[in-house]
Structure formats: C-alpha cells, structure tokens
Amino acid sequence: MRMVTIHDGADCKRFRVPSASDWGDLAAYVASTLKPGDILALSGPLGAGKTTFVQALAKALGATRVPRSPTFALIRSYPLHRRGPLKRLVHVDAYRIEHPSEILALDLDEELADGKTAVAIEWPENIKGWLKRKKTIRVDIKGA
Ligand SMILES: Nc1ncnc2c1ncn2[C@@H]1O[C@H](COP(=O)(O)OP(=O)(O)OP(=O)(O)O)[C@@H](O)[C@H]1O
Ligand SMILES: [Mg+2]
C-alpha cells in the first residue's frame, strides 16, 4: 500500500494505491492533466514505487513500449501515440547523479522547450540545482 500526494501549485490531491498493479487511476489522472513542459518530481524512498508509477503513466499516455526501470540508463524517452500536443515522456532516474554537470549533459532544457515533451524525474533531490528555478508537479510517495 502506498499513499501518494500530488502538489501542483496551490492544488493538492491524495491517492491511495493498494498494490503495485493499482497505479492506473492515479496515472490516468496525471495523464489527463500533463502538458508539454511539465516536470514531475517523484519523491519517495528506495522501492517506493516511482518507476512503477512512471510505467503506469507511460501506458496511460499511450506509450507503445513499456518503460523498463532506468536504474542503469539515466534517461529513457518514450514516444506517445495520442492526440494533443504531448508526444513524448522522458523518464530520468537521477539516483546515480553525483555531480550537477551530469544533468546539464542530458540536454533536458532543450527537450522541455520543444513543445511536445514532459519529464518525470526519480530522485529529484539529486538535481536540486537544475530544478531550483523551475516549476514542478511534486509527487510524494509514502508507505514503502
Ligand atoms: N502501491 C504499491 N503497493 C505495494 N507495493 C508496491 C506498490 N507499488 C509498487 N510496489 C512495489 O514496490 C517495489 C519497488 O517499486 P519501484 O521499483 O517502482 O520503486 P522505486 O521507487 O522506483 O525504487 P528506486 O528508488 O529503487 O528506483 C516493487 O516490487 C513494486 O512491485
Ligand atoms: Mg526506480
């Protein structure tokens, strides 16, 4: 069981996710609100379900490939086949980032500016400098 709180500006919503296969409703909700340029900051301890959530989100957004856990790949890009402007979900796992310059090397600013990309970031705490001047949608997962 996980409790998830989503902070989007002044808006705050809570969801209960009973098991690993129950992220669909939350994913559908986030998918319905997600826009190009949005940054999802996914917080929660090791094994919280951050990757599981991104997988459900990608599915809800119409990704044809199911994302694998990017534990060894820092970044994965998922083309979305859907109506509307959002055409790509980029999944970043910042767990292994030790130096701020590593995030700059990912060209995320450029990707976010293309008018068709949203980004979901695991371990946003590791790239605080890059996130500092940016508006994020915070997804906090508790209960692991
Ligand atoms: N709602 C849930 N209730 C119970 N177990 C869950 C839930 N969601 C995911 N899990 C389980 O938690 C485990 C860890 O999930 P996941 O890899 O998504 O976590 P993570 O937050 O990405 O971890 P890491 O910090 O290592 O990247 C998996 O075994 C998954 O099945
Ligand atoms: Mg993970």
Image: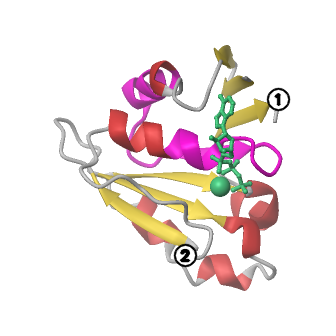
Nearer the N terminus, badge 1 or badge 2? 2
Whether residue 67 is situated above or below residue 101 in the rendered picture:
above
- Give the residue at x 44% y 70%: 110
- Give the residue at x 73% y 23%: 1
Whether residue 77 is situated above or below residue 15 in the rendered picture:
below
Label 1 and label 2: CA atoms lie apart by 26 Å
Q: How many other residues sit within 10 Å of disc 2, few (<14), some (14-19) or many (≥20)?
A: few
Ligand 2 sits in quadrant: bottom right
Count of numbered tags? 2
- Give the residue at x 63% y 64%: 93
Q: How many other residues sit within 10 Å of disc 1, few (<14), some (14-19) or many (≥20)?
A: few
On the image, the x and y values in percent for residue 44 come to 79, 43
Task: Indicate the quadrant containing the C terminus: top left, top right, bottom left or bottom right.
Answer: top right
On the image, the x and y values in percent for residue 141 come to 74, 33
Asked if one can make out residue 112 in the rendered structure from this viewpoint, the answer is yes
Question: Element at badge 1?
Answer: loop
User: Is residue 129 rendered magenta in the image?
Assistant: no
In the shown orientation, is residue 74 left or right of residue 45?
Answer: left
Q: Confirm if mark 1 falls within 8 A of ligand 1.
A: yes
Point out the stretch of residues depicted in magenta. 26-54
Asked if one can make out residue 135 in the rendered structure from this viewpoint, the answer is no
Label 2 sits on residue = 73
Quarter holding residue 3: top right
* Type of the residue with mark 1: Gly
Question: Element at badge 2?
Answer: loop
Whether residue 28 is situated above or below residue 38 in the rendered picture:
above
On the image, the x and y values in percent for residue 16 come to 67, 15
In front of the other: 42 or 12: 42
Label 1 sits on residue = 143
